[in-house]
Amino acid sequence: MTGHLVFSTLHTNDAVGGITRLLDMDVEPFLLASVVKAFIAQRLVRTICPDCVQLVDYPREYLAEIGVPVKELGTRFQRGAGCDQCRQTGYQGRAAIYEICLVTEPLRKLVMQKCDGGELKQCAIAEGMETLRQDGWRRVAQGKTTIEEVVRVTQTDEVMAETTEEAEPVVAAESADTRPRLRRNLPREKDQRLASGKKELSSADAESEVGRFGRRANRGS
């Protein structure tokens, strides 16, 4: 807006989350749409140990379920077997995977309309944005990291994008209902015990004071 190129950081789950976060911070939509040029998200993945790397065949059904483009990448990928050099982990070092969201004209229009994060992300993907997981698959194809590592660091983003209120587990709802009830009941019982204890102490103190007063009266006489 003033001719200066500014870089800043935000805590979000993905690149598009930067838009919704700024809107939540009361940044005007017209300023956000006209000034911000791009959002970049990153995750660190562990890289395969070069001393124990091996080729592994993965089930096609599993790869299709987690979104791996099997037709382009196939089903055989590298993975570390574990050795003394990597302390039997199969990994050495780290590398970054990225998600770059360019604020294009269609995305600007959605920002001006204050659309939710799901619509913004769909628009960004339609405009050519590659997600963190898609960039992770590229690193897997290059032999830099494993499928398990990409799934691990991007699982939260995928689950949050697919989870709805109806899909929330029943156990979580039950625990949320029972915790406040326990918290309400426990202080009452504690207060009752404290109140009864205070009554017992006050009566005992009163008897003790009466006894001391009687002894003083006898001494004076």
Image (tube, helix red, strand yellow):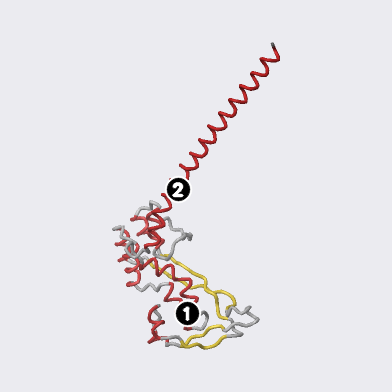
Relative side of 43 to 91, left or right: left
| Image coordinates for residue 106, horizontal then vertical, percent | 30, 66
Report the amino acid beneath label 2: Arg
In terms of secondary structure, where does tag 1 sit?
helix
In the rendered image, which residue does mark 1 sit on? 147
Report the amino acid beneath label 1: Ile
Q: Please report the residue visible at 45 percent of the width from the left and 86 percent of the height from the top.
A: 58
Q: Nearer the viewer, residue 186 or 68?
A: 186
Relative side of 45 to 126, left or right: right
Check if mark 1's residue and mark 2's residue have beta carbons within 8 Å: no
In the rendered image, which residue does mark 2 sit on? 183
| Image coordinates for residue 63, horizontal then vertical, percent | 41, 82
Q: Nearer the viewer, residue 85 or 120?
A: 85
| Image coordinates for residue 89, horizontal then vertical, percent | 59, 78
Q: Which quarter of the picture shows residue 47?
A: bottom right
Q: Please report the residue visible at 52 percent of the width from the left and 38 percent of the height from the top.
A: 194
Badge 2 density bin: few <14, some 14–19, many ≥20, Cα 10 Å: few
Badge 1 density bin: few <14, some 14–19, many ≥20, Cα 10 Å: many
The quadrant in which the C terminus is found is: top right
Q: Nearer the viewer, residue 167 or 107?
A: 167
The quadrant in which the N terminus is found is: bottom left
